[in-house]
Image (cartoon, helix red, strand yellow):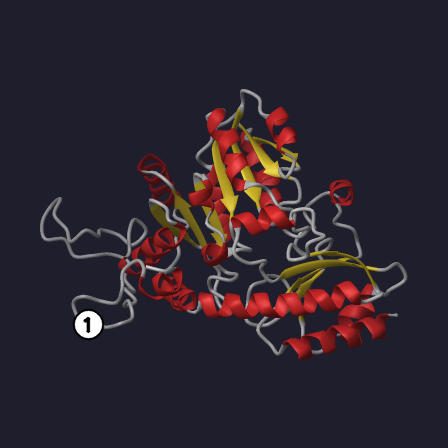
């Protein structure tokens, strides 16, 4: 089945008992048991819920993985993956990873002696040189948030397997519609499903997919033990959002390319980060492992442009956290998504104070360009 069909019919397709084409919302905390040790397959909704299970089977199908899991947020999914490791272990992490990922590793898991090292994972030599006996995983984003650095998933997976460590890929920006890390060798794939998978800025959710039974058992134990599950209604809402992912992503891609070309030609933009340009250092690699460029564009305003006036000048594009919704969202990484990253690290990796991240939505592309043009002129 092609992915456009799988998005609609994957996982558990409808309801066998009633013939309903939409999976029912099982809004229940517990289940009647016939006798001691005898039940219908469900005991308590933290452990398993039919609506959540339909979503979990769907994301496993879409990613081509063994088993999927749904969490209350993307960071809950990331935290569950990090709980696979123990005190004294170390994780190699992409250097310009999402600020929330950095924060939970640096401020929470570091307290339990889970160590990390920030590495430019696009440089395979640096990755290999960073692997020591205590390294147990390589955690990558590709493209990274917000600088759109591209990492070779297959090569990283090869390095990981050679050293008997796990490869974990945050696939939020690409979604399984555009990129399938497990098929490229990854062990675990993560999503902030709040973003493109949900697609409408109306839910918070995280998804995780593993490539084998042993990891599946371990993650399920963590999910059930720590309890950061996704509720039935949001599970249903996310299934509904996923059904339109292909048409949304096609439009996102089209709009982003149009907007990126405008920004590239604008004299008020100093630098642009967009993997769809042949001049992007990771262009050919990204093209070989993904089927589209996505809809995130980061760009640096030229010196002298008033960033506050630029944001104020926008009338159609919304200044706000998050990305991946039908509406275009714009943010300031240094004070918003990556504020938890120390200033020195931000400057070193390129998250400068005049860097802007744009999530291109589904509005008319000419309207979006007009809005950006007016805001840039206003900020001069």
Q: Residue at x 58, y 33 (%)?
A: 92
Q: Residue at x 39, y 67 (%)?
A: 243
Q: Which residue is mark 1?
A: 19
Q: Nearer the viewer, residue 317 or 202?
A: 317
Quarter where residue 380 is shown: bottom right
Q: Position of residue 317 (x, y in %)?
A: 67, 73
Q: Position of residue 155 (x, y in %)?
A: 54, 35
Furthest residue in direction right, as rendered: 304
Furthest residue in direction top, as rendered: 133
Q: Residue at x 69, y 45 (%)?
A: 341
With respect to residue 77, does 7 lie above or below?
below
Q: Quadrant of the N terminus?
A: bottom left
Q: Residue at x 74, y 72 (%)?
A: 372
| Visible residue check, residue 183 | yes
Position of residue 129 in the picture relative to residue 312 (left or right): left
Position of residue 331 in the picture relative to residue 374 (left or right): left
Position of residue 195 in the picture relative to residue 117 (left or right): left
Q: Nearer the viewer, residue 78 or 145?
A: 145
With respect to residue 4, does 71 lie above or below?
above
Quarter where residue 259 is shown: bottom right
- Total tally of numbered discs in the picture: 1
Q: Position of residue 166 (x, y in %)?
A: 47, 33
Position of residue 193 in the picture relative to residue 146 (left or right): left
């Amino acid at each position: 089945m092609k992915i456009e069909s799988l998005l609609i019919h994957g996982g558990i397709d409808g309801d066998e008992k009633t013939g309903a084409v939409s999976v029912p919302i099982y809004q229940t905390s517990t289940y009647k048991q016939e006798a001691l040790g005898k039940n219908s397959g469900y005991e308590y909704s933290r452990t398993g819920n039919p609506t959540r299970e339909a979503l979990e089977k769907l994301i496993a199908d879409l990613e081509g993985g063994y088993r999927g899991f749904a969490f209350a947020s993307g960071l809950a999914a990331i935290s569950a993956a990090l709980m696979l490791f123990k005190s004294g272990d170390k994780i190699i992490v992409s250097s310009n990873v999402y600020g929330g990922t950095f924060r939970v590793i640096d401020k929470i898991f570091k307290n339990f002696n889970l160590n990390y090292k920030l590495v430019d994972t696009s440089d395979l030599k640096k990755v290999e040189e960073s692997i020591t006996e205590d390294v147990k995983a390589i955690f990558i984003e590709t493209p990274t948030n917000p600088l759109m650095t591209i990492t070779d998933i297959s090569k990283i997976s090869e390095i990981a397997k050679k050293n008997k460590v796990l490869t974990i890929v945050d696939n939020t920006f690409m979604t399984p519609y555009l990129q399938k890390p497990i098929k490229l060798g990854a062990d675990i794939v993560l999503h902030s499903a709040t973003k493109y998978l949900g697609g409408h800025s109306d839910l918070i959710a995280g998804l995780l997919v593993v490539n084998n039974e042993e990891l599946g058992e371990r993650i399920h134990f963590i999910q059930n033990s720590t309890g950061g599950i996704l509720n039935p209604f949001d599970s249903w809402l996310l299934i509904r959002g996923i059904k339109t992912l292909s048409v949304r992503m096609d439009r996102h891609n089209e709009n982003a390319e149009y907007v990126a070309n405008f920004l590239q030609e604008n004299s008020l933009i100093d630098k642009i980060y967009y993997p769809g340009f042949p001049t992007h250092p990771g262009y050919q690699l990204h093209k070989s492992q993904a089927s589209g460029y996505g809809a995130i564009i980061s760009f640096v305003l030229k010196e002298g442009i008033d960033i506050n006036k630029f944001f104020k000048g926008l009338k159609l594009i919304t200044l706000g956290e998050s990305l991946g919704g039908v509406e275009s969202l714009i943010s300031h990484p240094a004070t918003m998504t990556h504020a938890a990253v120390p200033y020195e690290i931000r400057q070193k990796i390129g998250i400068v104070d005049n860097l802007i991240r744009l999530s291109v939505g589904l509005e008319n592309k000419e309207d979006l360009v007009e809005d950006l043009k007016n805001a840039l002129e206003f900020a001069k």
